[in-house]
Amino acid sequence: MDTTRVLPAPTGAWAVDRPGPVDGPGPGPLVWEQRHPEAPGPHEILVEVEACGVCRTDLHLAEGDLPPRKERCTPGHEAVGRVRATGPGVEGFAVGDRAGVAWLAGTCGTCAYCRSGRENLCPGSRYTGWDRHGGYAARLTADARFAYHLPEDRPAEELAPLLCAGIIGYRALERAEVPRGGLLGIYGFGASAHLTAQIALARGARVAVFTRAPAARALALDLGAEFAGDSFDPAPEPLAAAILFAPAGELVPVGLAALDRGGTLAVAGIHLTGIPALDYRRHLFQERTLRSVTANTRADGAAFLTEAAAVRPVVRVTRYPLRQADTALADLAADRVTGVAVLVA
């Protein structure tokens, strides 16, 4: 059947109406509306969403930290669901398959970055929940070439966080270059960090966590961290590497100062508050490195999902019905979520 000629029935979806504080007075930035999902075009699949993770990037988009790029866009880029229709030219997916729709939604495929295996840096890259409608909805369409096949042996709400929290954490871990046996410092301990810590431990690294939330510190120790302190506490020993997950620029000097000689601090967020002035000898001398992390490649996603299938990290999930996405974002903003928030159909 030529699914491009079939208009899907209207379904519910959240949209960013007016970006602003999710916990401010009056109506929040998200509104619930009925919408016809976009029929799948060439290379696209129509996915019925089973679960969608709630990412801090969604919060940045809702509150206006990141400027909107699509009018009344539906957030959500950790969507797990079933393929209900396919457009022309789709390969590798059939109706009924379980699919994962992640942050990276498309690239030009022809620029120097795409041709050299660095498609995450493509100037024409597009993103789910920012450039095209995302998973805070009953259904969404996605480019099948950027979607992932997902296993059947785990609940959808445990798979959803792997699609961004897991993949971005994996790339940050790769960028941090922590050696086996080295102490990895993790600043902030939310969705991405609690997955990344488990991958690092499985690789033979040691983990120290720095976070302001007592419940997150308890979770870190429960998952195998050997130290858990406040964000500004001194490290128990010089860090071989560090990852900053908290969107707090004031922690950049803290993380750099805690590094051992030759160590790397990888900043994993898409948004960061202002970074205070750095002192060269204290923060960067002796070949300490500060690196950013920009999105991911599809190869990153495939490699992480393969590693996660072997490690099977514990995914600490707080579930919310789809109709409570606004509540989930408010809880995330107020640090009331331990682990990861997930919307379930």
Image (cartoon, rainbow, N blue to C red):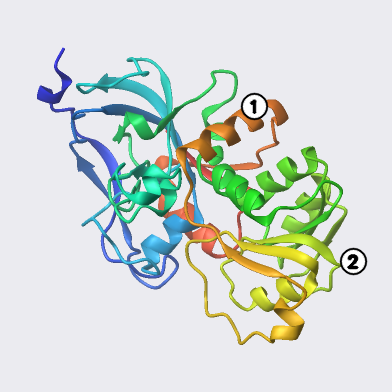
Could one spot residue 136 in this view of the protein?
no
Q: Is 168 or 107 nearer to us in this picture?
A: 107
Q: Residue at x 56, y 38 (%)?
A: 162
Q: Residues within 10 Å of mark 2 (few under 14, many from 20)?
A: few
Could one spot residue 302 in this view of the protein?
yes
Classify residue 277 by image quadrant. bottom right
Residue 56 rendering spot, x and y as whole percentages? 50, 57
Q: Which residue is mark 2?
A: 237
Q: Residue at x 65, y 84 (%)?
A: 278
User: Measured along the vertical axis of the image, is residue 276 above or below residue 294?
Assistant: below
Seen as rendered, the residue at the extreme left is 5
Q: Is 77 or 342 nearer to us in this picture?
A: 77
The answer to which of marks 2 and 1 sits earlier in the sequence is 2
Q: Quadrant of the C terminus?
A: top left
Residue 327 rendering spot, x and y as whole percentages? 46, 54
Seen as rendered, the residue at the extreme top is 1
Q: Is 26 or 38 nearer to us in this picture?
A: 38
Q: Residue at x 18, y 28 (%)?
A: 9
Q: Which residue is mark 1?
A: 309
Residue 143 rendering spot, x and y as whole percentages? 30, 33
* SS for dot 1: helix
